Image (cartoon, coloured by chain):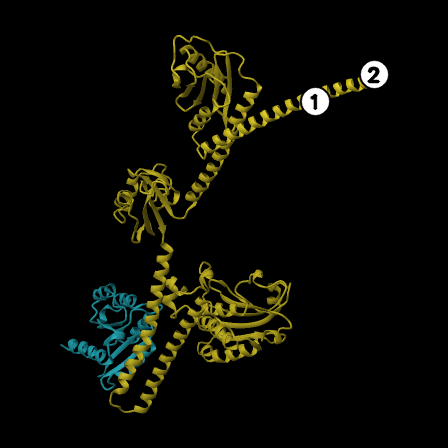
């Protein structure tokens, strides 16, 4: 069965790049433009991994994490933060919610991003 | 007969000579008197001048009276000249003796002067309060002669009696009108000089103190022992002690809390004559820079003589804020450029990978992404360029007669698709009577792009956006023009924005969006604005330069731009371009 990835990011380019860039044999990608849409997606299905941006309109990444923990605690979905906001504050807030990885989006290549996704999945398997 | 005649002639001759002689004598007397008068007057004037010169710009009454009394013997005879001056705690009595007199003579004059002072000021003076200074000839027991001539003149400065001056002698009948007149003149002259000088100094002091009091910068001046001599309200505000009357250096030391070593810097200023400019520091929510320098007692004479120090607290809060805004602006731009650049880079990375199934479709998609991202970056860079042109005041427009209706319709088509996607009703309301007026077509489109895209951005799905254009007639009320047009705006437009004596093109872009809080309205058109408001930034991306650029374009056309809004019901942006009715040939 294909692994489901949910990309929550207000940058349309990034959403499209992940959708196009992943191995379609292995992964199925759904997208959301902000935290509100992300929560709507969670109602419908349970992804195996969430790529989460922090700075987004309407509901930002940290608010999304808070909501997810209170509303979907049972799902225990691994999260990788993909943001250009690499402030310590964000990282420590992320840690409170058991975030599995941080990617400073603009600094990393697609290859690295893909490798991080695979790493989280291989760790989850164990 | 002949003899008689001769005799008669001789008599006449004698009579004539006598008459001539008498006349000559009278003339001589008159000349002598005139000479005496004029030489006396010259002498008087010379003395007055000498005294005037010696008084110079002195404001010390003591010193001035000393100068007068030391010159007085040149034209008035006296055994003693003395003056009495009232000081806060005592009465100064100074007597200069030209000839030796008995002690009783001195005491007598002292008592007479004290009495006349008392009469002048309607106040009683005690003998114990008198501080006596005698100079000149010595007192002699043998010369026991009483005061036989005595004359008192009150010393008046600025309508106030400050003392009396007295000449006295043992000889009787000395002081007649002539001497008294001179003395009066002298005293009057000196009193006038001092009075006017004091008025000037007082006015100058008031100017300086008013200036220091009303300065925005805090000013503190101390003496060499760091006691505060002058402090203005702004300086008290720095340490949050506006209402405290007495402020010491310790109030500053306590409140500055090591952010600026005021005591140490003052010590350097006083002892080493060193100036100091501090780093910026913050206190009570404001930023200051302090300047410390020595105060020299006389800028010309004793240039090295330092008697204190001055600290000036210059409020740099505004500069710090501006710098912060600029830094934020820069980091916003970097962020806005980094996102599309990184998108382009990642897309290229994917394009470099070996092509998989459906490669052509995929490639087209990637090229689209690159195109969109680079277009966005270009727009941003153009906005920044426009904004910097605005700042440099180099914004130029290429005017040509243009039909605003055509320009608006062109923009309507451009935005139709995105409005349709979001079920927003996009409408235009353009009157038929608008003449062609000089416009920069590209720049006008840019303004409409900005106003219309904002309106669409802030209007929820199923709302509506209306663009209107009409001519405002001189003297007409804009409210009635709008209602005639059946245009519904969230709030009425301010009448004062529309010219009274000229026709003007009015364009409005109104929406049924979220509205803008009234406190934000005045700031909307300023550069960097989006940054100053967090909620604005978090909801809508962008540089926030658009409205500032739109304002610049409208103003370059000689027009003005404005906005009215109502929270919950929407906003209306509008611009007004006054025009003349025969403008085309001249203005193009």
Can residue B155 be seen in the rendering of this structure? Answer: yes
* Residue at left offset 59%, top offset 71%: B470
Under circle 2, the secondary element is helix
x and y percentages locating residue B159 in the rendered image: 52, 28
Would you name the residue on which mark 1 appears? B23
**In the displayed structure, would residue B516 be above or below residue A110?**
above
Circle 1 — which element?
helix
Confirm whether residue B434 shows in the render: no
First of labels 2, 1 by sequence position = 2
Question: Depth check: A57 or B560 in front?
Answer: B560
Return the chain for callout 2: B
Cα–Cα span, label 2 and label 1 = 28 Å
Residue in view at x 48 percent, y 23 percent? B72
Residues tagged 2 and 1 counted as in contact (Cβ below 8 A): no
Direction right: furthest residue: B1
Q: Which chain is yellow?
A: B
Task: Note whether B544 is above or below B128 in the view shown.
Answer: below
Color used for chain A? cyan
Residue at the spot of label 2: B4
């Amino acid at each position: 069965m294909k692994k489901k990835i949910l990309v929550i990011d207000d940058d349309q380019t990034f959403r499209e790049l992940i959708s196009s860039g992943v191995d379609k044999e292995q992964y199925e990608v759904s997208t959301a433009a902000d935290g509100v849409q992300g929560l709507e997606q969670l109602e419908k299905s349970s992804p195996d991994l969430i790529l989460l941006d922090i700075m987004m309109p309407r509901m930002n990444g940290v608010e999304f994490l808070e909501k997810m923990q209170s509303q979907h605690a049972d799902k225990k979905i691994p999260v990788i933060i993909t943001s250009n906001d690499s402030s310590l504050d964000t990282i420590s807030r992320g840690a409170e919610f058991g975030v599995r990885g941080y990617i400073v989006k603009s600094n990393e290549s697609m290859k690295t991003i893909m490798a991080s996704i695979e790493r989280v999945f291989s760790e989850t398997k164990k | 007969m002949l003899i008689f005649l001769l005799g008669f002639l001789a008599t006449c001759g004698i009579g004539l000579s006598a008459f001539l002689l008498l006349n000559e004598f009278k003339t001589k007397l008159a000349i002598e008197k005139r000479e005496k008068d004029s030489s006396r007057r010259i002498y008087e004037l010379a003395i007055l001048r000498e005294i005037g010169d010696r008084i110079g710009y002195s404001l010390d009454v003591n010193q001035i009276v000393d100068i007068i009394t030391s010159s007085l013997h040149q034209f008035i005879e006296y055994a003693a000249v003395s003056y009495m001056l009232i000081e806060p705690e005592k009465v100064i009595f100074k007597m200069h003796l030209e000839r030796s007199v008995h002690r009783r003579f001195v005491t007598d004059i002292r008592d007479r002067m004290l009495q006349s002072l008392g009469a002048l000021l309607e106040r009683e003076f005690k003998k114990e309060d008198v501080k006596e200074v005698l100079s000149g000839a010595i007192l002699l027991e043998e010369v026991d002669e009483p005061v036989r001539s005595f004359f008192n003149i009150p010393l008046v400065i600025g309508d106030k009696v400050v003392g009396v001056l007295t000449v006295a002698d043992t000889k009787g009948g000395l002081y007649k009108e002539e001497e008294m007149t001179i003395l009066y003149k002298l005293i009057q002259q000196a009193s006038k000089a001092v009075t006017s000088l004091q008025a000037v100094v007082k006015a100058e002091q008031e100017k300086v103190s008013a200036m220091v009091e009303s300065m925005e910068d805090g000013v503190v001046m101390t003496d060499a022992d760091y006691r505060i001599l002058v402090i203005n309200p702004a300086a008290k505000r720095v340490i949050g002690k506006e209402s405290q009357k007495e402020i010491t250096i310790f109030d500053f030391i306590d409140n500055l809390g090591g952010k600026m070593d005021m005591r140490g810097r003052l010590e350097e200023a006083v002892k080493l004559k060193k100036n100091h400019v501090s780093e910026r520091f913050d206190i009570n929510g404001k930023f200051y820079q302090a300047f410390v320098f020595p105060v020299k007692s006389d800028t010309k004479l004793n240039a090295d003589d330092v008697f204190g120090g001055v600290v000036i607290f210059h409020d740099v809060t505004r500069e710090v804020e501006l710098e912060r805004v600029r830094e934020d602006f820069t980091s916003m731009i970097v962020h806005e450029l980094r996102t599309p650049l990184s998108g382009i880079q990642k897309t290229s990375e994917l394009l470099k990978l070996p092509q998989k199934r459906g490669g052509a479709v995929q490639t087209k998609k990637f090229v689209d992404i690159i195109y969109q991202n680079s277009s966005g970056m270009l727009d941003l860079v153009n906005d920044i360029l426009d904004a910097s042109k605005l700042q440099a005041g180099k914004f130029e427009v290429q005017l040509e007669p243009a039909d605003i209706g055509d320009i608006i319709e062109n923009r309507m088509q451009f935005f139709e698709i995105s409005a349709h996607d979001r079920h927003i009703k996009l409408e235009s309301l353009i009157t038929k009577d608008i003449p062609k007026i000089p416009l920069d077509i590209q720049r006008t489109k840019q303004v409409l792009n900005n106003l219309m895209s904002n309106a669409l951005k802030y209007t929820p799905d199923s709302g509506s956006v209306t663009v209107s254009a009409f001519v405002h007639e001189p003297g007409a009320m804009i409210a009635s023009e709008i209602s005639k047009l059946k245009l519904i705006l969230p709030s009425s437009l301010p009448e004062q924005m529309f010219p009274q004596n000229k026709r003007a093109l009015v364009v409005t872009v109104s929406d049924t969006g979220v509205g803008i809080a009234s406190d934000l309205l005045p700031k909307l058109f300023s550069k960097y604005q989006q940054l100053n408001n967090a909620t604005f930034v978090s909801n809508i991306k962008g540089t926030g330069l658009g409205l500032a650029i739109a304002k610049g374009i409208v103003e370059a056309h000689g027009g003005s731009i404005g906005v009215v809004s109502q929270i919950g019901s929407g906003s209306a942006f509008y611009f007004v371009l006054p025009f003349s009715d025969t403008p085309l040939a001249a203005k193009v």
